[in-house]
Image: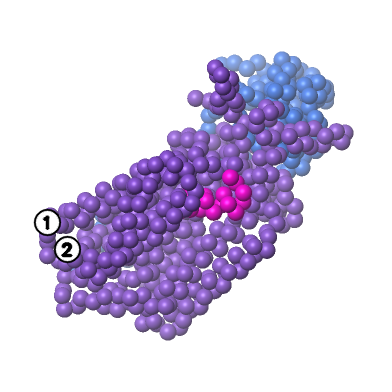
Amino acid sequence: MSEISDQTGRTIPTGPTSSTTKSATQLNDELLSSLRTPTWKWYGLALFLGAVVAWGLAAFSYQMYTDMSVTGLDRPVMWGVYIVNFVFWIGLSHSGTMVSAILRLCQANWRRPILRAAETMTVFTVAVGGLFPLIHLGRNWVFFYLIPYPNQRGLWPNFRSALLWDATAIFTYIIGSSLFLYLGMLPDLAVARDRASGWRLKLYTVLAMGWRGTAREWVVFQKASTLMAALIIPVAVSVHSIVAWDFAVTVIPGWHSTIFPPYFVIGAIHSGVAAVITLMIIIRKAFHLEEYLTPLHFDNMGKLQLVIALLWSYAYFVEVQTTWYAHEPIEWEVYGFMAHKYTFILLLMLVGNAILPIICLCFKRLRRSIPVMLVITLLINVGMFIERFLIIVPSLSHKNMPFVWGTYRPTWVEISVTAGAFAGFALMYTLFAKTFPMVATTDVREYETQKRLVPVGRTRLPSLAGKE
Amino acid sequence: MELLGIFRDVESAAGAVERLVREGFTEAQITSLTSSPYPDGVLVKTDQRSWFRWFTLACGFAGAGAGFLLAAGTAWLYPVRTGDKPIIAFYPTGIVTYELTMLFFLVGTIVGMFLEMRLPPRGKRLYAPEISEGCIGIGITIHAGGEAVACGEGLKPGECVGGIAVLPADEQKRRAEEIMKEAGALRMVTEATL
């Protein structure tokens, strides 16, 4: 048990008196371990990621300086890897906040150590995803034409364009998920403030807004957390539905389908939950949080992933089966082209997204195995990236007019920008993890405070005190 | 005038609150400062009502109006004639209105929450960093001294003043300090630092 000094210099142990639980100071030390001085390994990682980002930026600058001909985009495929990235990253962003919000509303106690990793992932993935429509614009430097404000150009954005719906939805989502992340961090920032010095003290003091943890502050905070969780879920669903409408409201074969919005939402949750698990594994290892991110957390997240894999498989089956049964020539042509031209990646997608997770995640032993979960979740996201590619490229390659059929191959510029985006996400996450508490400290401590081992029969079982 | 006692654990802090109430201080005068939440009544009893959700609702309505005006109003002001498409289209107007409504709801929740918490504060207040390390702070607002107003029907919790209010403020403070020390306070904080 740790100690503090009182006015007289006496050393006093702090925190819960139960010998079965750790003191608050011990918990703070362990949960805020990510804020310790960076090691050389950390600097090396940040430098490497920074270099990849710089390479991606250089490729993008080259594209701006030259023109869009340096990409693989050409008639009839005018949406390529940039839009694949856009859909993929927005999909990834979907689950972080949503999983966190649903688990908060359900008051699932196992949620506590994973909240921050999930919410942070949302903010950074939506930030990266939101860049891709701008990268894809062509004349990127006039991106501000999208913003509706009175101007001397005499131009006003056309809200009938799906691009504007995306811009509005992503703007709402990035603000909403950032506020949700900040709200959850507020009491942790106060804890970090009380232990900090130098620039960190100034930063946390400003961000903690004078939080003291009075009973009244906690009452209002908890009500606000519940309300935010309830409000952010429909926003998350709407964002990916709107991304799906980018496709579904067109008359392109393969896209014009009513199932697209729910199918996109399910796919987004599929990749998002997988990404949360991947990040949990990395954070667990990097910050030695084995005691807090236990096999139980992976087991529960694995069950969630299994349900979503089944849902995704069902939605995919319905989509293909309807097209197969109707056998409309142009629709079937798109599927035929996709199966013939992209056989390997199509099979990889089906294995990664459906077959492997459904088989493996049925077994508790595999769900609780960290290496297995890492492989499965990484493969799911490889599968989801392929799925986005196979939605976009084959449909555009074989549209209604056979004399403009064509194909698409991304160039080094597009691949570099994509690599830069992945590195950019990882870099932002790495910097955030060193600057802000990566585990919801007060949430975990609340649970530890309320938890007691109670003797029942011949053993002692954990019991939880709390309001109804 | 305020006073803050720092306690090592919940039990001694709760004991101090009970003694303070028995002495004549009201629940509304006493608050707890903790780094993790405790269910109501473990330390102090707090008014569970809050008004910020009405503020959120008002913001949502404002957002709906703003979204409708942005999509439909500006389409009407700056008409873009495209084939036989309507100038004010139902579908895009619905999407933009919905998104701005939700945005205003979310922003309204955070702003309303801070307004109700009165954060950030205007001046410095009593605080001790040990609270972040698991200690419990029990804060008490000392009445200026005068007539006691019994709690009852028609009075808000903050409006009633316990029997101890008949004593001068300094005497109330001395008694509160004494009670908290007897209950096991590690130290008393009287200087505002946060």
The part of the chain drawn in magenta is A275-290
Q: Nearer the viewer, residue A204 or A394?
A: A394
Report x, y in % for residue B134.
70, 35
Position of A15 relative to A287 (above/below): above
Position of A6 relative to A327 (above/below): above
Of labels 1 and 2, earlier in sequence is 1
Tag 2: amino acid: Glu
Q: What residue sits 85% from the left and 33% below the top?
A: A10
Q: Residues within 10 Å of mark 1 (few under 14, many from 20)?
A: few
The chain that appears purple in the image is A
Label number found at residue A326: 1
Q: Which chain is disc 2 placed on?
A: A
Tag 1: amino acid: Ala
Q: Is residue A289 left or right of residue A323?
A: right
Q: What's the colour of chain B in the image?
A: blue
**What is the quadrant of residue A88 in the picture?**
bottom left
Q: What residue sits 44% from the left and 42% below the top?
A: A365
Secondary structure character of the magenta stretch overall: helix
Q: What residue sits 83% from the left and 34% below the top?
A: A11
Q: Secondary structure at mark 1?
A: helix
Report x, y in % for residue B147.
73, 18
Query: Distance between the Cα atoms at labels 1 and 2?
Result: 9 Å
Q: What residue sits 52% from the left and 51% below the top?
A: A281
